[in-house]
Amino acid sequence: MIRNLLLAAFGLMFALQASAADVVGKWRTIDDETGQPKSIVEIYEKDGKYFGRIDQLLMKPNDTICENCPGDLKGKPLVGMDVITDMVKKGKKYEGGEIMDPVKGKVYDCKFWLEGDNTLKVRGYLGFLYRTQTWQRAQ
């Protein structure tokens, strides 16, 4: 009986960890205008917050420096750069952080959520205006 309780407790702990880390991993971003894959962004958790860094460029691998990024990010390599910062999980959504468009050099409020296991909806806000992208899990 104690063995069954321990197994159930470990199973529950594993399930809770899996659900907490459901967005963690690599995601293929899609260009809004062309519909082509643009980059691979790795979402990771650090100290209870979620971040997304560029892992790989797919469209313009020669364009690797952020010329339009704000502040200290200007002139830095895109690969390895955090473009999503300080997201907090609230229910099934992640919000409260920001997302940066390195092409335009603009920073937006951000929210994202899973739709199924392999689709991530990423929304950037500027006031009441917003744009939503669909990212696919990279295998």
Image (cartoon, grey):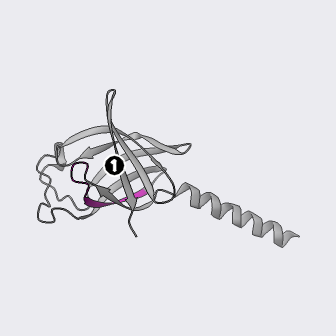
Q: Residue furthest bottom?
A: 3
Q: Is residue 40 above or below residue 127?
A: below
Q: Is residue 12 above or below residue 123?
A: below
Compared across the picture, whether 18 is left or right of 76 comes to right
Compared across the picture, whether 116 is left or right of 70 comes to right
Indicate whether residue 4 is drawn in magenta: no
Q: Residue at x 11, y 65 (%)?
A: 62
Q: Residue at x 15, y 53 (%)?
A: 66
The 10 Å Cα crowd at callout 1, few under 14, some 14 to 19, many 20 or more, is: many
Indicate whether residue 40 is drawn in magenta: yes
- State the image coordinates of residue 14 (x, y, percent, origin top left): 64, 64
- State the image coordinates of residue 99 (x, y, percent, origin top left): 31, 44
Regarding mark 1 in the picture, which secondary structure is present there? strand
Q: Main secondary structure of the magenta part?
A: strand
- State the image coordinates of residue 92 (x, y, percent, origin top left): 54, 45
Locate the N terminus by quadrant. bottom right
Quadrant in the picture for residue 135: bottom left
Compared across the picture, whether 114 is left or right of 64 comes to right
Compared across the picture, whether 128 is left or right of 47 comes to left
Depth check: give the residue in front, 13 or 139. Answer: 139
Quadrant in the picture for residue 139: bottom left
Q: Mark 1 belongs to which amino acid? A: Ile
Instruction: Name the residue beneath numbered marker 1.
Output: 84
Q: How many marks?
A: 1
Depth check: give the residue in front, 98 or 71. Answer: 98
Q: Is residue 95 above or below residue 63?
A: above
Please report the bounds of the magenta region as a residue range: 32-44
Q: Residue furthest front?
A: 34
